[in-house]
Image (spheres, rainbow, N blue to C red):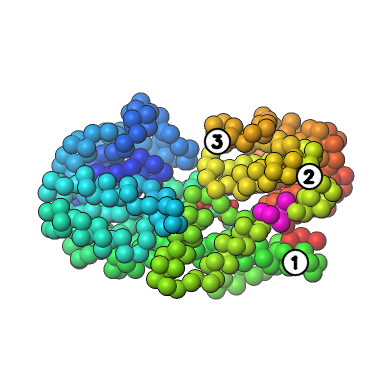
Amino acid sequence: GKPERQVAVFGAGYIGLVTGACLAELGHRVVVRDIDPEKVALLRSGDVPIYEPGLGDMIARNKERLTFTLDLGETLDGAEIAYVCVDTPPSASGDADLSRIWSVVKSLEGATHLKAVVVKSTVPVGTGARVRAALDAAGLAHVGYAANPEFTAEGRAVTDFMRPDRIVIGASDEATAQLITDLHHGVEGPVVVMDVRSAEMVKLASNALLATKISFINEIATLCEKTGADVEEVARAVGLDHRLGPHFLRPGIGWGGSCFPKDSEALRQLASNTGYHLQLLSAVIEVNNLQKRRAIQQLKDELGTLAGMRVALLGLTFKPGTDDMREATSTVLASRLLAEGAEVRCWDPMARPGEVEPWVSTTRHATPEEAMAGADAAVVVTEWPQLKEVDWARAAAAMRRPVLFDGRNLLDPAGMRALGYTYMGVGRP
Ligand code: UDX
């Protein structure tokens, strides 16, 4: 059978919205609560504050079962399951700041009809035990607890929720594990039940291993440059080993986004707090920082100096298919370039204006060609498919100096050189 549940989702951010919409799509009644009046007003008017393929349609077609509110009473009225989807940004010490989680837990006092509290936010291992204690102290000892981490990638979050590689449920007791398993009825993917601490660790370990694969191939790419090998060929063949797999072996100017930088740092700090220094992960993070500085150095070597040079950044978001600028490589490149005295021009089809303006003297253009006009160098930072359609011959002619740093190995080196570019890729001869 498929029991329909009444679910309260706390947080209308990325994860809360996707979770709320997908649970409604599965047939549950969902109330999403956020403390930001603007966001709630926007959602109530039928708008979606973030760009995520399929999400807007899903919210629209489930509006009978999916409501948005600022009001706590409305959120908890009849709620059987409370999903905590608030953000856990890094604090001054590098540990995750859990204050938003605590404020949600505090707001549950008196919701005695609740059956379970589920934390989806990424949290340090041991958080569940602390939430458990807080629930006990709040007179909610009979309410179950589960950790249910998300593994969704931006740009495919709805699909990742509905057809995941796995659903990880770390539960305090069997009844809660069953309740959360049943809640996912209709989701196509294996359910893996375990203890709470292990479930918390799965999330951090998964992201750290993915980041490790990228930093690893980036180091191999550097070595390819020094030895004349082609990292694209190397990655392709390495990835054919089924024990290694083809994914996350794309070299570039380093990983960014809302998860990898934050979660890898949080895991490193978590380890430090136990007195153990995670050596491998520390190197993974260091390689990622170096990768961006190396790119700037390569440009500097090619141009002689960066002072007074006009550089076009093509693509600003941390990956294509999103408007998310969090920890985007472009932000580091832009501020390094500006620090070196360069003039920065940029193009991106989706980055929201307010997120780019803080870069003083960075000028934004409507097309890649326009951003490249008169430039001394262009850098492909994000592999937007639009860049495949650029008239590269014309763009080269309009540049002051046709230097092209392809930070995503998006373009064909021989073809670009034939058009007159001084082409630099990552790990390609
Ligand atoms: C990631 C995880 O994939 C997801 O499971 C987790 O829940 C959140 O973090 P996301 O941040 O949306 O998702 O982006 P992802 O597509 O994984 O890319 C992360 C970064 O790595 C991007 O900057 C991307 O450009 C970079 N990357 C990815 C590479 O440089 N090479 C690769 O081969 C893959």
Quadrant of the rendered structure where residue 398 is? Answer: top right
What amino acid is found at the position of numbered circle 2 in the picture?
Leu
Residue assigned mark 2: 306
Of the pair 231 and 28, the residue shown nearer to us: 231
Residue assigned mark 1: 224
Of the pair 3 and 359, the residue shown nearer to us: 359
- Give the CA separation, mark 3 to mark 2: 24 Å
Of the pair 58 and 201, the residue shown nearer to us: 201
- Give the CA separation, mark 1 to mark 2: 26 Å
Does the closest atom of ligand 1 sit within 8 Å of the Cβ of label 2? no
Residue assigned mark 3: 355
Q: Is residue 215 left or right of residue 68?
A: right
SS for callout 1: helix
- First-in-chain label (3 vs 2): 2
Residue drawn at point x = 31 percent, y = 36 percent: 35
Q: Is residue 293 above or below residue 40?
A: below
Q: Is residue 329 above or below residue 56?
A: below
Q: Quadrant of the C terminus?
A: bottom right
Q: Is residue 152 left or right of residue 405?
A: left
